[in-house]
């Protein structure tokens, strides 16, 4: 059921780093992005794949994790993603990808969830250093990094507190809590 898949598709930031994800799995996930909607069907998105420890080690330091968890610098060695999909815009096709990368990212992460994996869209990226570290040509703009792995944390959705605070938080047991607005608060009536 699609709702169940969307519900389970949470942002995970801690993983069993020793559980590998192979290149063929990443190709299958990129195929879901390929099949997704694209403004004017321009299809400017390209992808760069990483699933070996040496390349992963170049990607990781260029990412920022969970800005609201101010005392948590990100996953420790052993709990880091075992693969990454970089979502790029090929500027020789279009100067901007519009919202294509968001749509593709969701398709890819739903596919990962269906495979029993999990991940996180990372938009807070040191783009210049990452592009240089990986030797990605200038014509490609790095839009998102999709971090992927076998989740090693529990993530729970909960109602927004009365204060209206939308910040996610982590409890003493390490469970990550994500407040979501109520459905009735999203639907505007006259
Ligand atoms: C466009 C976009 C950019 C994001 N960038 C980051 C990021 O740089 N680092 C991070 O840890 N999480 C990032 N996230 C994950 C959000 O924090 C997460 O979606 C939000 O807390 C809600 O949790 P949920 O995905 O489990 O519903 C990003 C999500 C989106 C949609």
Image (spheres, grey):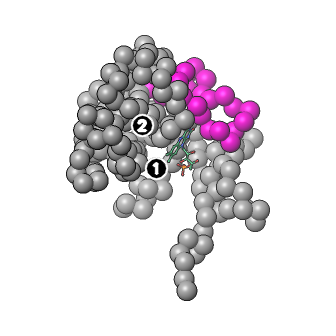
Residue 48 covered by magenta stretch: no
**Label 1's element?**
loop
Quarter of the rendering containing residue 143: top left
Label 1: how many Cα within 10 Å (few below 14, some 14–19, many 20+)? many
Nearer to me, 22 or 166: 166
Label 1 and label 2: CA atoms lie apart by: 20 Å
Ligand 1 is found in which quarter of the picture? top right
* Front-lying residue, 104 or 7: 104
Q: Badge 2 local density, few (<14 within 10 Å), some, or many (20+)? A: many
Magenta run includes residue 73: yes
Please identify the dominant SS of the magenta region. Answer: loop
Q: Quadrant of residue 65?
A: top right
Left or right relative to 71: residue 77? left
Tell me if residue 163 can be seen: yes
Q: Where is mark 2, residue-wise?
A: 143
State the image coordinates of residue 108 (x, y, percent, origin top left). 35, 44
- Residue 178 lies, in percent from the top left, at 62, 52
Q: Is residue 190 above or below residue 115?
A: below
- Please identify the quarter of the rendering in which residue 153 is found: top right
Q: Is residue 151 above or below residue 59?
A: below
> Mark 1 near ligand 1 (CB under 8 Å)?
yes
Horizontal side of 8 relative to 104 (left or right) equals right
Query: What residue span does the magenta drawing correspond to?
Result: 61-82
Residue occupying image coordinates x 54% and y 78%: 188
Q: How far across and down, in percent of the image, does residue 190 sit?
A: 55, 86
């Amino acid at each position: 059921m699609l709702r169940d898949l969307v519900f389970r598709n949470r942002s995970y930031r801690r993983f069993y780093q020793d559980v590998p994800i192979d290149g063929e799995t990443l190709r299958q996930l990129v195929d879901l992005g390929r099949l997704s909607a694209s403004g004017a069907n321009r299809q400017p998105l390209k992808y760069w794949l990483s699933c070996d420890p040496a390349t992963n080690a170049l990607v990781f330091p260029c990412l920022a994790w969970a800005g609201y968890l101010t005392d948590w610098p990100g996953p420790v060695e052993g709990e880091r993603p075992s693969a990454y999909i970089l979502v790029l815009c090929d500027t020789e096709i279009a100067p901007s990808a519009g919202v294509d990368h968001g749509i593709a990212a969701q398709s890819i992460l739903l596919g990962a969830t269906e495979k029993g994996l999990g991940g996180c869209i990372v938009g807070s990226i040191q783009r210049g250093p990452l592009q240089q570290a990986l030797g990605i040509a200038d014509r490609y703009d790095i839009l998102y990094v999709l971090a992927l792995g076998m989740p090693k944390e529990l993530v729970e959705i909960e109602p927004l507190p009365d204060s209206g605070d939308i910040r996610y938080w982590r409890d003493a047991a390490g469970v990550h809590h994500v407040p979501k607005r109520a459905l009735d608060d999203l639907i505007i009536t006259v």
